[in-house]
Amino acid sequence: MSKTQRRHIRIHTPIPGPKARALLNRREKNVPQGPACKLPTFAEKGEGAILTDVDGNTFIDFAGAIGTLNAGHRPAGVVEALKDQLDRYIHTCFNVMMYEPYIQLAEKLNEITPGDHPKKTFFLNSGAEAVENAVKLARKFTGRQAVVSFDRGFHGRTLLTMSLTSKVKPYKYGFGPFAPETYKLPYPYYYRERDGVSPEETDRELLRRVEDFFLGEVPADQIAAVIMEPVQGEGGFIVPSKTFVQGIRKICREHGILFIADEVQTGFGRTGRMFGMEHYEVVPDLMTMSKSIAAGLPISAVTGRAEIMDAANPGEIGGTYGGSPLGCVAALEVIRMMEEDGLPDRAQEIGRQIRDRFSSLANRYPQIGGVRGLGAMCAFETVKGDGKEPDPGLAGEIIRACGQKGVILMGAGLYSNVIRTLCPLVITDDQLQEALDVIEEVVEERLR
């Protein structure tokens, strides 16, 4: 597709443009370098799957605020719900004077999350806070201290969640010591298994090694919880098998270990179901949610079995801004959109189109490998030559070049060689194909 044929992307000035450069100078003087951004420009407006920067350039957003915008930028129903709430009250703090939207959202999440057992829900501000509090509840309920996560997993940047996270740079390097009583199990990575080893063999071996882990690392009766992403996000969009997930759940049940599903990135339609764990027919004891719950409003949730959620006494969990009224009404409208507009089904079709295009690239270029995904949560790896040696440099080049041509992409993976897609589920077919055309064009320019 030539530049003149593009309908949604409009690049008027090299990025960064003059207004963006002025803002970058101000940022350099006033904001630390830690909060990183690889696209050197600033937003002016967002609508659906389109972002416009301060210089008038328009982009198709395949990052979605790191998976926060499954419902798109500024969905009309969310905007109206927020305006209505602003006319009532902005914040009272649920711990000071309660409000109905908090109860309504808790009821709704108790209804739609996996399992028909009695559940309860409470709210926080971020995914990391949700994980922290799920662990607190698990420890309180079981009387145990140890928590187990998985290799390549990502659960946040706070002390505890950073300790549960696997990748050292940029998330952990120089920030130790880490929280005690955190351990890691291997998570399947079928693409990188040695030749001739089937996924079934991998699953059997990894599940067998859990018993060795109980003998060599921490006894099962001291483990409060195992926390798992249904699809590893920052780890590289790695999809486990149903056999593996169900096997871990079975082991947890046998040993009285709580199973926490971290649905922060996989939740709210991204994988083609409302929640990723539904693909595996696994009902978790506790579930953490955030990101796309409220179209960009900062709110997170922990939903779990009622008896576990009630393990904490009054005042032992909560926070000043937890479950803000604005976040609650936005989340209620997002869930309505998901259900009435069929966005999880739409995610499956989006994913099919993305994987078809990525598979076509992989068939033509040996440097493109490991095409995978669940629903619209899709990715491929960049590798060197005909082998599987990671090539993070090529991934970075593709991401930067796509940004200059009007498609916002993000990387991932332990080796930083994974290119992932997190486009809003409201993206049109025209927008989707235009973005995929740009990605294909960039890959061809670098590899042909």
Image (cartoon, rainbow, N blue to C red):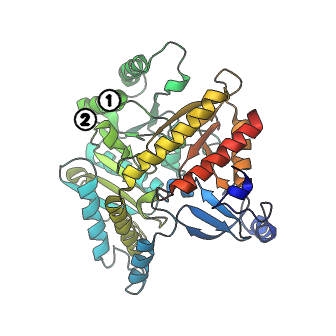
Residue 166 visible at all: no
- Looking at marks 2 and 1 on the same chain, the residue that comes earlier in the sequence is marked by 1
- Circle number at residue 159: none
Q: Taking 195 as reference, is 177 above or below it?
A: below
- Picture residue at 52% right of the left edge, 52% below the top: 158
Q: Nearer the viewer, residue 322 or 329?
A: 329
- Marks 2 and 1, how far apart in space? 8 Å
Q: Nearer the viewer, residue 303 or 319?
A: 303
Q: Are marks 2 and 1 in contact (CB under 8 Å)?
A: yes
Quadrant of residue 200 within the rendered picture: top left
Residue 143 lies, in percent from the top left, at: 28, 43
Residue under pointer 2: 256
- Picture residue at 25% right of the left edge, 57% below the top: 110
Amino acid type, mark 2: Gly
Residue 160 lies, in percent from the top left, at: 48, 47
Amino acid type, mark 1: Ala
Q: Secondary structure at mark 1?
A: helix
Residue 140 lies, in percent from the top left, at: 30, 49
Residue 32 visible at all: yes
Q: Secondary structure at mark 2?
A: loop
- Picture residue at 67% right of the left edge, 29% below the top: 365
Residue under pointer 1: 220
Residue 122 lies, in percent from the top left, at: 32, 61
- Picture residue at 42% right of the left edge, 32% below the top: 240
Task: Give the quarter of the figure containing the C terminus.
Answer: top right
